[in-house]
Amino acid sequence: MLRKAGRIKIFTDQKEITRDNVLSVLRKAYSKHRINAAEIQYLFDYESGIQPLPYQKIIRPEINIQTSDNIANYVTEFNKGYFWGTPLIYTQRGNKEHHDTDVDTDSFGISALNEMMINAVCIGRENQKLADFVEKSGIGHRIVDIKRDWSSEAYQSSYVNVYTLDSRNTFCVYYDGIGQPKVMAVTYAKRSGRVYFSCFTKTKRFEIQGDNVEEFPNIMGDIPIVEYERSVDRSGCFERQIDLMDNLNSMVSNFANDVAQKTQEIWWGNDIDFPTDPDTGEVIKPKSGQWLLTHSDSSGGTNQKIQPMSSTFDSSPTLSAITDTRNEILKRCFVPMQYSSEGGGSTGIASSISSGWDSAAVDADRKQQLIEGAAREELTLILKAISLVDKKYLPEDDPLRKIHCTDIDLKFTRRQNWDISTKANAYATLVSHGVHGRHALKVVNLFDDVEQVYLDSKDGIEQYQQNTYGTEESSDRIMQDSSDQSKNSPMIGSPRTGDTQQME
């Protein structure tokens, strides 16, 4: 049974995992992980549509339609598209930074890193796999590994392996002291009834089957498995609203049952008898429908009636309750009304607020801060793996080897193209007032790969700013107003209409 309290974070009182204590720590941690694994499976089943109603139908049990509205899938797919739809982009934090490396070297190195992750690693595909676990279950896991196989030309442009792991077979163990550092990460597989564990610490890798422990050095020098958390309580995107979703399923199912029962009425006959078959003596009943026969002794059997047994059912309140409940679930899950029509006349910003897009963006910003921590941990592992690549595949002076994790900003893109003109104007204003082109691109959030757009546009941006600052303005105004229309309009002040002052 799902606790609906998020996944358990697994702790140990051991500061360091060694060959002597790895078995005892693993057994205690594995018992807690099995609770998480069962809950993750429940959430996966629920999202796939396995949503049994919390009651049994006892009136006319032969008509028992159990419909799953499956709004859990709707909420999950929205989050996977809105938050995870565009791959994370790495950008240079600034031209002046602590490591004082060459600006162009950093730019080319970060651009090459983006190219490798997007085109060679296909990180977008891995992100969707990761999102499936993070959004449904609240946690997800990814492993970064050193590149060992260089035989395939298709993968030679990738200097690192990045894979998404199944969170039902993966967990991390943290020390329960100050800071709660991660001391071990575990992934396992079941084969022929046996469980094979791979346990990683910063310096060792333990392969365990039963009581047999094999020890190997960890070349990465760090725990290569990263645990992503969607929220502080590690719950899924729809988990807190499961009770309300069950209620919605009940209402939708009851409405469907009522329609079916109206179509398949029970008929009532009063003071009537069905004919009898002379050969068999059995009563000949109608072949379709169910009948209820009654007799009115007080009327002497003269009150004959044949009619359907109907109950008055007003469908409008039920349909309204279904709609209200569905909208309430979407609101609580921070999913906007994507297909509702709010009427005309609203600006883009007003429509965004009224339909819930603004709330979705605020919740995404909250989630981004948690995801960012794990993404930066993953970036550190990627750069470590790159530093271990053989020099014959990646030259020592390659810019990829010279970038630092702290020099890199993580850029999450959630595009809303209905305000593209506003963003373009904002970008033009920022650049024309001396803001660095890269920072202006980050602010307007208009392009997926900010670093590459800046590199491709750098010469033009710098030339424009140089020309702008080298020219003195003839006016003190910094914004246009209506007086500018006399020179912009083909009508005002034109020879056909006369002088502007005459029109006034």
Image: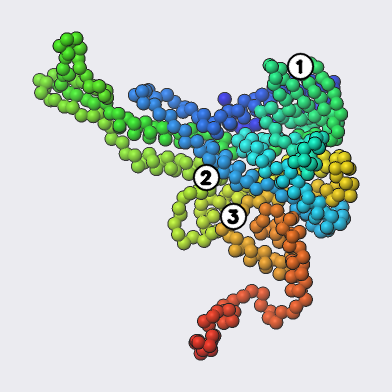
Distance from Cα at disc 2 to Cα at disc 1: 48 Å
Say if residue 349 shows up in the picture: yes
| Of residues 252 and 235, the one drawn nearer to the viewer in this rendering | 252
Distance from Cα at disc 1 to Cα at disc 3: 53 Å
Query: Image point 53% across, 50% down: which residue?
Result: 356
Is 445 on the left or on the right of 275, as rendered? right
Residue 65 found in image quarter: top left
Callout count: 3
Distance from Cα at disc 3 to Cα at disc 2: 19 Å
Reading the image, the residue beneath label 1 is 210
As helix, strand or loop, the secondary structure at mark 3 comes to loop
Amino acid type shown at disc 1: Gly
Reading the image, the residue beneath label 3 is 416
First in sequence, mark 3 or 2: give its number: 2
Reading the image, the residue beneath label 2 is 331
Query: Image point 44% across, 43% down: which residue?
Result: 324
